Amino acid sequence: MTADLIKTVFQPALSNAALNEGNDFAQLPVPAFGTEGGRLVVSVDSHIVKPILFPGGDIGRLAICGTVNDVAVSGAIPLYITAGFILEEGMPIKMLKEIVQSMKQSADEAGVILVAGDTKVVEKGGADQIFITTTGVGWLDGPSTIGGQYAKPGDVVLVSGTLGDHGIAIISARGELGFEADIQSDVAPLNHMIEAMIKAAPNIHVLRDPTRGGLATTLNEIAQQSDVGMYLNEDTIPINSVTRSACEMLGFDPLYMANEGKLIIIVPPGEADTILEVMRNFDYGKKAARIGIVTLEDKGRVLLKNALGGTRLLDMMAGEMLPRIC
Amino acid sequence: MTADLIKTVFQPALSNAALNEGNDFAQLPVPAFGTEGGRLVVSVDSHIVKPILFPGGDIGRLAICGTVNDVAVSGAIPLYITAGFILEEGMPIKMLKEIVQSMKQSADEAGVILVAGDTKVVEKGGADQIFITTTGVGWLDGPSTIGGQYAKPGDVVLVSGTLGDHGIAIISARGELGFEADIQSDVAPLNHMIEAMIKAAPNIHVLRDPTRGGLATTLNEIAQQSDVGMYLNEDTIPINSVTRSACEMLGFDPLYMANEGKLIIIVPPGEADTILEVMRNFDYGKKAARIGIVTLEDKGRVLLKNALGGTRLLDMMAGEMLPRIC
């Protein structure tokens, strides 16, 4: 629905080079220094997650990390954040303080500064507790060479850790599991790890955080943007055993579940081991793994192969995504 | 309430140089070029105005103009805008299209580019039709010398036109007047006029758009930030006759009503006439006027004098501001 909305409403009206590139960030020349120089990178996300406190995080940490990660996957260094708060009248101040404190801690961890904010209050029933919209601003020394359009046949597909944990943590916090799963959201700022990766491996083609729609949806987007195919080895995709059990019980596929602290990396084979090594030196990359390759065949499609020789098409998200997951 | 919230919740947790300056914009060094060079200027606003369509504008035009103006009053050239949309399920697409189109037109008029956007949908009853949070990014060639802290005794106070029109237009659109007032919101992007003013008069001390709380609240803020007094000549303050009548009937004071396309300018006396002349050459400044002076006496206070020799204290907004005015 949202993708439809963007295509039918926003893109036709607002079309410009930065929006049309289709990444989660906009690369902006700083006119005073000409288009050959550095770039501003900005990214915006509205956060409406429900519940606003969940195992492993809260809407404040989510708002900072989501935006920091969207800026960082461009290769830019995230510097500044703005935040617009929409509060429902009667929202407990204590809870708001906790959320703002959590934003501060997450911003400090990421090394970014929240430089501007605005708050509006809506009458009771006019909003649901709190919504936070964050914009991140980062700096890139030259034009970005990392983006969803740069995957090449022969490249290797890596992920930085277990998939689907944020989605299951939210469902569990809503009490919709019928039991309490011992699973924490993975919400985390990945910019320091990304910076180290880029330093060690300068030829990364694609970096993206698989949030709404999960690994499967994000890889399908990249396959289409780059006009390539992808073969994944199902047995190598890291999935937490609790997340796997919860998904089996609920009939969900963890490859379609949201993540808020994970990366997809697509890179020439010569740099794959270097990147895996760098990631495993960070807390947020301990379970990094090689999960597949980019192919010339099956353009625009993602195929999942298992140890028994079976192959299935990992389609774009069919049906409805979980509402208010981020 | 919001000011309280900022003081008790946001400032303690998020304190940093840019936020603490107390302007509606943040001045940001671009690290790659050192702190002596140009500055990024960013500003954020969440928009929850009700109704979302009103005489003279809509929430989309408001979102663009409000943010463009907040960036421009720093002296920066606004360049880029990001927008986060929170939509209530069932919001008519036709209305959304109109709003987005209006954003595009306003952005074109201002000469800014909406470079990043995000949309989230909340279930019916979880939000009220549409909320839009915009962040503006602008460029300033050096450190800003314009700000609420720079008013000096002897300076002249100017306004760019009639006051209170946005507030009355919203109240009228809500049907709360009991009659339909023939008044349009003044919502407009002021950046081109501001650019011309700064070019013609390089010693402007303060520029600010008196939105929520109106002229009176904004001048009180400036008087406190600069530790000066202000004497206004009541008879010279431009007020539309319809707005004045509507205010009299409702018991409102137009000096406390919101504006979305007006400027307060505080400037040394030698440049006042030049600025008035520049403003009057723009559609949005036709009714610009000189309304008062900055004083050494009555620090932190704003006094209103009328032709009969009466003087009254124009206090900070007492009581409640109109909800959802922007």
Image: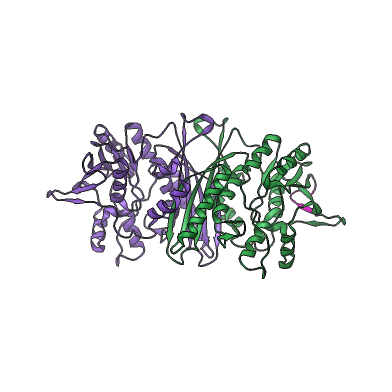
Chain colours: A purple, B green
Relative height, residue A33 to residue B169 (above, below):
above
Q: Is residue A41 left or right of residue B194?
A: left
Q: Answer whether residue A33 is visible to the viewer in this image.
A: yes
The residue that appears at 23% across and 55% down in the rendered structure is A241
Q: From the top left corner, tell me how far across and down residue A105 is, in percent.
A: 45, 48
Which residue is found at the position 64% from the left and 64% from the top?
Answer: B171
> Where is residue A10 drawn, in percent x and y?
45, 51
Residue B300 is covered by the magenta coloring: yes
Picture coordinates of residue B147 (x, y %)?
Answer: 66, 42
Q: Classify residue A314 as left or right of residue B228.
A: left
Quadrant position of residue A19: top left
Tell which of B123 and A229 is nearer to you: A229
Residue farthest bottom in this picture: B178
Query: In the image as oriented, which residue stretches furthest toward the left?
Result: A308
Q: Which residues are magenta?
A: B297-304
The residue that appears at 66% across and 66% down in the rendered structure is: B180
Q: In the image, what residue occupies the spot 62% across and 68% down?
A: B175
